[in-house]
Image: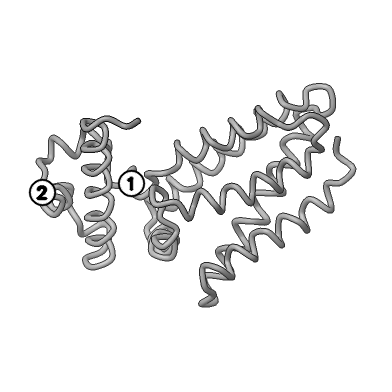
């Protein structure tokens, strides 16, 4: 059970995220200051730095949590589970995690728009994408140590993430709903995994 202190920390973190996203949307990312975010969330700037190191970190607030869940799922593969089945299960689970309150799928279009238009956020997103793919590939190789080599694992993760992310981005850029973006992600994953059926 989560204690009172932890619940208060979660509420403060959530308030900072909400305040930042609201200000980024209204004023623009580069025009918004850390002091404004803190004031909007009714905390001090010092408190802001207890939760985030920078404005960029606020926008990518769920990256570490998602990665921990993903690597844990890969590490606990079911007996006899094929690599493609595990990866498709991971895609479906990721979409479910995104709909949980902590990850806020509803914020996805705003976050995506900011990442696509602000150079510093583009750079951070690319770095995080590269790093996350390396982590997932290592986890996959470890989980299928008797079936996959590093190239197999890298190809599987690269194809899967590339296909799903591009499908989601193109769907949202064309004005598609979040439900359509989720459907596009699953379909893209299935198409990519069909091409990887020989692996493992």
Q: Residue furthest bottom?
A: 175
- Residue positioned 72% across, 36% down in the render: 154
Q: Position of residue 123 (x, y in %)?
A: 44, 48
Q: Give the camera-side residue of 97 and 143.
A: 97
- Residue positioned 20% across, 35% down in the render: 49
Rounded to the nearest angstrom, the CA distance separating label 1 from label 2 is 20 Å
Q: Where is mark 1, residue-wise?
A: 56
Horizontal side of residue 5 vs 158, given as left or right: left
Residue 172 got which mark? none
- Residue positioned 65% across, 44% down in the render: 90
Horizontal side of residue 153 vs 28, given as left or right: right
Q: Position of residue 20 (x, y in %)?
A: 25, 54
Residue 42 got which mark? 2
In which image quadrant can residue 83 be found? top right
Above or below for 129 versus 142: below
Going from N to C along the chain, the mark reached first, 1 or 2, is 2
Q: Position of residue 34 (x, y in %)?
A: 17, 47
Where is the N terminus found, in terms of image quarters? top left
Q: Residue furthest front?
A: 1
Horizontal side of residue 63 vs 53, given as left or right: right
Q: How many marks?
A: 2
Local packing at callout 1 (Cα closer than 10 Å; few below 14, some 14-19, many 20+) is some
Question: Mark 1 or mark 2, which is nearer to you?
Answer: 2
Q: Give the camera-side residue of 10 and 181.
A: 10
As helix, strand or loop, the secondary structure at mark 2 comes to loop
Above or below for 78 versus 112: above
Where is the C terminus found, in terms of image quarters? top right
As helix, strand or loop, the secondary structure at mark 1 comes to helix
In which image quadrant can residue 117 be found? bottom left
Local packing at callout 2 (Cα closer than 10 Å; few below 14, some 14-19, many 20+) is some
Dot 1 and dot 2 residues touching (CB under 8 Å): no
């Amino acid at each position: 059970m989560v204690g009172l202190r932890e619940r208060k920390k979660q509420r403060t973190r959530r308030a900072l995220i909400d305040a930042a996203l609201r200000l980024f949307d209204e004023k623009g990312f580069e025009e918004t200051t850390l002091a404004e975010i803190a004031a909007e969330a009714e905390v001090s700037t010092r408190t802001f730095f207890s939760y985030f190191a920078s404005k960029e970190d606020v926008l990518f607030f769920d990256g570490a949590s998602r990665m921990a869940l993903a690597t844990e799922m890969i590490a606990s593969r079911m007996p006899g589970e094929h690599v493609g089945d595990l990866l498709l299960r991971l895609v479906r689970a990721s979409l479910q995690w995104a709909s949980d309150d902590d990850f806020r799928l509803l914020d996805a279009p705003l976050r995506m728009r900011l990442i696509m238009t602000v150079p510093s956020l583009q750079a951070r997103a690319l770095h995080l994408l590269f790093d996350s793919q390396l982590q997932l590939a290592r986890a996959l190789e470890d989980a299928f140590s008797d079936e996959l080599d590093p190239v197999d694992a890298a190809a599987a993760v690269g194809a899967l993430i590339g296909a799903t992310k591009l499908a989601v981005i193109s769907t949202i850029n064309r004005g598609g709903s979040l439900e359509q973006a989720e459907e596009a992600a699953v379909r893209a994953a299935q198409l990519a995994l069909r091409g990887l059926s020989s692996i493992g």
